[in-house]
Image (cartoon, grey):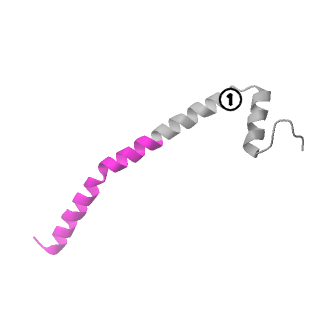
């Protein structure tokens, strides 16, 4: 076996060893997407006053303020 072949084998082992971390990251991303979808569905069910209050809070203003 040549040094080049050994380097290729080491690269293969390095890549294969990252599988679990990649799957964990993917699982985390999928869970985040599911949570985002659920949150969007909840926001879609808010009535106008609730939506306004939430938007005002997000913008840092209080519900009673008028600008």
Tell me: 25 left or right of 6.
right
**Where residue 15 appears, x then y in whole percent?**
28, 57
Residue at 57% x, 34% y is 37
Give the farthest residue toward the bottom: 3
In this rendering, the answer to whether 15 lies above or below 40 is below
Residue at 57% x, 37% y is 36
Relative depth, front residue between 16 and 51: 51
**Where residue 21 appears, x then y in whole percent?**
34, 49
Quarter that holds the N terminus: bottom left
Mark 1 crowd level (few <14, some 14–19, many ≥20, 10 Å Cα): few
Residue at 67% x, 31% y is 43
Q: Does the segment drawn in magenta span residue 9? A: yes
Identify the residue under disc 1: 44
Magenta-colored span: 1-29
Tell me: 53 left or right of 35.
right
**Where residue 19 appears, x then y in whole percent?**
30, 50
Residue at 68% x, 29% y is 44
Give the farthest residue toward the right: 67
Q: Quadrant of residue 26?
A: top left
């Amino acid at each position: 076996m040549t040094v080049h072949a050994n380097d290729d084998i080491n690269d293969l082992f390095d890549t294969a060893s990252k599988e679990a971390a990649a799957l964990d990251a993917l699982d985390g991303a999928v869970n985040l997407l599911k949570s985002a979808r659920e949150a969007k569905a909840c926001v879609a069910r808010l009535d106008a006053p609730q939506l306004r209050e939430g938007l005002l809070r997000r913008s840092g203003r209080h519900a009673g303020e008028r600008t």
